[in-house]
């Protein structure tokens, strides 16, 4: 496909349920009267989908879509009046005039195809992390959301926590001085290996072809569902793809990061199909005004970066921010200034970032009033892009130089092949410029 996108192309999706012309019309974003509830559709009702639905019960859940009848059964029973689907394309065709917003909790490879289709119907969207499966998708979703002036939120729920707010305030108040390094460490690590050769029968409760959706066809095997699809490049991004947005979110927020200019990665010899059990990725971010350039690292599946041991970072910490006046150790619920003795008398700044109404509630209010969301697709798209670039650097084995404005890896032309992916025939989605 050409690197420039053609606004005139539209989707004609021919699925197993019907031949669908999804985007033949637009439904305008409507206004809301006081206390009016949103009519919400869910793409993905089991697993994370069920958890997201539980946080949206103040609204009307009018449609549910899931390809796994066993995992979706509790939600299908709980929201008995909601219309039930297995193909999200059919949901959008039949319910376009009846829904206001969509929550997407399907596996990564479905995030943007479902989200962008919904946004082209002018539906507000909440999408689980990572926002996208490819760089092109992340940029595309952010652009469509901005063009349509829609309320969007990526599911980095911990962004709404009080702890994250206090950490951001400490950094921005200069508690540890000028920060030019930050390090993230995930202790665990999983992988998959070679594609299985066995072809067991598809469980009767699973619509396998619909689960694959835009991804290339492959025979069913239980090694993919319900969880370990994360470890296959066609569907996920490994441990890094799964958790990177959560950890990077804090660093991007505290340091006002946007796009890296250099990315390098190491790990085991890259596998053509499955993700690595361990990985170390290093980014260079440019100066932001008078603030210095920043080095950001990610490590999973192996020992913590040396800076953890060198500074007696507590075992509970997964992140360290390094300033010229000290360190800040963090996790979702805790924070600690180091060395402790040097900060024994430190008085933190008064809270200045308002408390969150709740990550889902923030999005609900935005849908109704146009108020901002903190993890909108513009912000979360940039966080997702950084994670995706780390995986591209790992898969190519090259130090990459990234030009975000040109949307191009400038020093390794072949690496640009990883910026986008082709969708399986019948699952094409609209392309815009």
Image: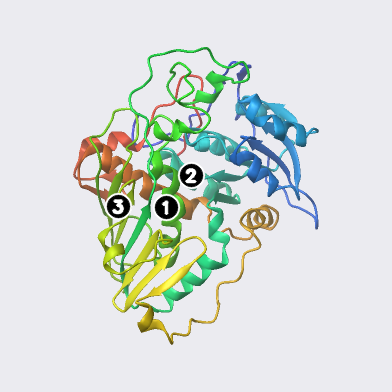
* One can see residue 407 in this view: no
The answer for how far apart the CA atoms under marks 2 and 3 are is 28 Å
Residue beneath the point at 42% across and 52% down = 383
Q: Are marks 2 and 1 in contact (CB under 8 Å)?
A: yes
Compared to 31, does 16 lie above or below?
A: above
Q: Which residue is mark 2?
A: 131
Image position of 415 (left or right of 15): left
* One can see residue 85 in this view: yes
Q: Are marks 2 and 3 in contact (CB under 8 Å)?
A: no
Compared to 273, does 79 lie above or below?
A: below
Q: Residues within 10 Å of mark 2 (few under 14, many from 20)?
A: many
Residue beneath the point at 49% across and 13% down = 200
Image position of 348 (left or right of 396): right
Disc 3, SS:
loop
Image position of 11 (left or right of 363): left
Q: Which residue is mark 3?
A: 303
Q: How many marks?
A: 3
First of labels 2, 3 by sequence position: 2
First of labels 1, 3 by sequence position: 3
Q: Nearer the viewer, residue 190 or 52?
A: 190
Q: Nearer the viewer, residue 115 or 218?
A: 218
């Amino acid at each position: 496909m050409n690197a420039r996108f053609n606004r005139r192309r539209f989707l004609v999706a021919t699925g197993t349920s019907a031949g669908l012309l999804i985007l033949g019309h637009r439904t305008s974003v409507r206004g809301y009267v006081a206390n009016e509830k949103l009519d919400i559709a869910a793409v993905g009702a089991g697993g994370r989908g069920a958890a997201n639905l539980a946080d949206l019960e103040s609204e009307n859940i009018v449609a549910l879509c899931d390809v796994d009848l066993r995992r979706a059964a509790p939600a299908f029973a709980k929201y008995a009046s909601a219309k039930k689907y297995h193909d999200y394309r059919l949901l959008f065709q039949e319910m376009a005039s009846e829904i206001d917003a969509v929550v997407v909790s399907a596996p990564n490879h479905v995030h943007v195809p479902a989200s962008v289709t919904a946004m082209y119907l002018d539906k507000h969207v909440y999408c689980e992390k990572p926002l996208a499966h490819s760089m092109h998708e992340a940029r595309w979703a952010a652009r469509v959301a901005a063009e349509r002036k829609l309320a969007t939120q990526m599911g980095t729920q911990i962004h709404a926590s009080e702890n994250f707010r206090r950490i951001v305030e400490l950094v921005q108040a200069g508690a540890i001085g000028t920060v030019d390094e930050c390090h993230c460490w995930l202790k665990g690590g999983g992988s998959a290996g070679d594609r299985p050769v066995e072809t067991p029968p598809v469980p009767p409760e699973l619509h396998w072809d619909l689960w694959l959706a835009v991804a290339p066809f492959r025979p069913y095997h239980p090694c993919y569902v319900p969880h370990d699809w994360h470890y296959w490049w066609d569907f996920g991004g490994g441990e890094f793809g799964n958790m990177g947005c959560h950890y990077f979110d804090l660093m991007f927020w505290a340091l006002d990061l946007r796009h890296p200019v250099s990315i390098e990665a190491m790990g085991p010899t890259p596998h053509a199909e499955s993700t690595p059990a361990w990985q170390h990725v290093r980014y260079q971010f440019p100066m932001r005004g008078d603030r210095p350039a920043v080095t950001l690292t990610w490590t999973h599946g192996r020992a913590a970066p040396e800076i953890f041991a060198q500074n007696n970072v507590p075992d509970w910490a997964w992140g360290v921010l390094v300033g010229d006046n000290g360190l800040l150790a963090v996790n979702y619920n805790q924070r600690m200034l180091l060395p402790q003795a040097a900060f024994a008398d430190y008085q933190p700044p008064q809270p200045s970032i308002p408390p969150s109404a709740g990550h889902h509630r923030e999005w609900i209010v935005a849908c109704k009033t146009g108020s901002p969301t903190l993890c909108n697709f513009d912000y979360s798209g940039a966080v997702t892009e950084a994670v995706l670039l780390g995986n591209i650097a790992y898969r190519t084995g090259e130090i990459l130089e990234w030009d975000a404005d040109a949307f191009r890896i400038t020093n390794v032309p072949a690496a640009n092949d990883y910026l986008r992916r082709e969708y399986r025939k019948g699952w094409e989605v609209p392309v815009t410029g």
